[in-house]
Image (cartoon, rainbow, N blue to C red):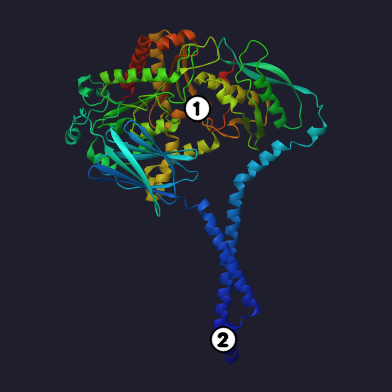
Amino acid sequence: MSSDAGSIPAASTKPTRGEVDLNKRILTSLAVVWLAGSLSPLFSQSPRLRLSAKDHPGFCRVTIAASLPLKYSLERAGSNLLVNIESSAAFRIQRETLQSEFVRSIGWSKGGGSYTLLIELKFAAFSFEHSVRENPYQLIIDLRRNEAPESKPAPPAPAAEKREAPPPASGAALQPSPVIKGKTGEQGGGVPPPVNQGSLNTDAGGPASAARNRATDSRAGSERGQSAGRLKTIVIDPGHGGLEVGAKGKFGTLEKDITLAIGLKLKAVVERNLAFRVVMTRDKDGDITLENRAALANNHKADIFISVHTNGSSRKKAQGSETFFLSLNATDEESRRLAYMENTSDALEGQIDKENKDDIRMILWDLAQTAYLKQSSKLAEIIQSELNELLGTRNRGIKQAPFKVLTGVACPAVLVEVAFISNPDEEKSLLSEDFQERVAQAIYRGLRQYLQLYS
Amino acid sequence: MAKRKNRKKWNRKKTGVLAGLGVLLIVLVFIFFRGNREKIRQIVEASFPKDASATQETLGSRTVTLFFLSDEDGMLHPEEREIEVAASPVLEAQQVIRELIKGPAGGLIATIPRDTRLRQVFITKQGVAYVDFSKDIVEKYSYGSSGEMATVYSIVNSLASNFKSIKKVAILIEGSEKETLGGHIDLSQPFSPLNSLTAK
């Protein structure tokens, strides 16, 4: 007993050989812990983004707080401000409840090596300033409304009224023109009608949640029921733009110009005839990435997405119109994700904590279009038959192809190749306003038929 | 006595913790390198094809089928070529792509700009062939959807139909992934061959 008592204090002052080993081991273990700690961000700790928007007198401040400095660029698109952020890492994105007189929603999409945050404003005439604060890193964007001299979009329907009398869900979407006239502004769909304030606050979810809701819905077989009570939205996407000119004709006609002309005519005819909100991915020449086009559509909770293109081929004999919908170039990873999406139920989601939810929504969002392939093929078929009938162009039929612009769109989506710009005869037609108008009419008729059949 | 026992216990615990951390480290290192190992293997395989090929140049020749575009029906039509038999599919696949770039011998239409250089081909164990082109393939054509489909699938179908080891084909430009060739077809995923585009 006494010897035991004696040996212990001795050990604590003068380490035995065993304890030197122990110390070494402790040191090694510390090193390992440090190493693991420094490596772990690669595997688990994803960088964070925190998004918030706060109204101040005269302006709205959007704050993007990040756990690391951001490489970003800003881009304006209609009533949207796009914030492109370069990042190879996957962000964990948190969003505060949105209550703003300026900002309708903040959404995001993720693409190879970059994120796009899409800040949707309630008006198209806005200006912005941005600045950066360090420690902690914050990107601050101040949004101001430009005073429009003739403020055309006087609120046509107060929110309360809309809540009491929501537009009927189904076939009644086809309403005569007067209903819609005042609502859709002239700025490329940039002045959408006011949205139910109540739903806005709870559902500031943006594109990702829209994608998820829709995906869930279509599984349940009630594709359109959910959109009852709000105005339907069609997104028209004039292909290419800016430096990306698309296919070229022998006479030098550029695809990007023709697609814009037809897109604007389609917008006009839809607005004249359908109670639809029309949003253009671009209403003038300019570069917009393919991902941003899809993001824009989802952020506007589009019900239909139509991308307008003119075709090109080195074949001299190539002619006629073609309507495409997405085919998945399915890889193992994709099918796995697809299976995941099909199996994800709300019950499962209930078990996922709130932070992880955003990540999961993002996964779904990448593949949004897969839930709509059936409807998309129907829409393609109907539009194609209208184009064949009206234009007398040879039927090149509907085709499936892995079109980048369609992959992330969370609603029925097609890509219309009106005619071959590479064919000199068709190039001449494409240049004529009359032909462009007839194409727009044909697409519109297809759209209307589709709505009658599938609303 | 009790204290010593405690210390022993403490030591054992330490050892347990250390072992745990060690395992963790190994797992981390494994995760870290696993992603790259495949790539490294591919690069090595592509750069140093099996030794035999260097010495045995004359293994004979074999007939391969290339697919070019037909002006008549817009479909991909076969054209046969002779290539040298090589010791690895990678070397033969390179020849197939080079022949494809040279263009058709008669009647059909080329699908790849003539100035395009083939930079690299590698084939993964899973049967994905990565074909890396110079940027000319993007810049020298102005693509419409149909043109882009023809280019992509003439490459994909030509490779997949001649090599059992190639199930899918991915297209790289200047060594990296590009979104599309001309704004249409998504290049971010490997392509399976599409037989509906080839003439029967």
Percent position of residue A24, x then y = 62, 71
At 68% from the left and 21% from the top, the residue drawn is B99
**Residue type at numbered disc 1:** Pro
Quarter of the figure with residue A375: top left
Counting from the top left corner in percent of width and height, residue A401 is at 50, 24
Mark 2, other Cα within 10 Å: few <14 / some 14–19 / many ≥20: few
Mark 1 is surrounded, within 10 Å at the Cα level, by few (under 14), some (14 to 19) or many (20 or more) other residues, namely many
Q: Residue at x 70, y 40 (%)?
A: B44
Write down the quadrant of residue A303 in the picture.
Answer: top left
Q: Identify the amino acid type marked 2.
A: Pro
Task: Count up the numbered dots.
Answer: 2
Relative vertical location of residue B125 with respect to residue A256 in this rendering, above or below: below
For disc 1, the chain is A
Earlier-in-chain disc, 2 versus 1:
2
Task: Using the numbered discs, state the Cα–Cα distance from disc 2 to disc 1 in whole angstroms.
Answer: 76 Å
Mark 2 and mark 1 on one chain: yes
Residue A69 vertical placement versus B138 (above, below): below
Q: Which residue is mark 1?
A: A402
The image quadrant that residue A379 belongs to is: top left
Q: Which residue is mark 2?
A: A9
Residue A194, can we see it? yes
Q: Which mark is residue A301?
A: none
Closer to the camera in the image, B77 or B44: B44
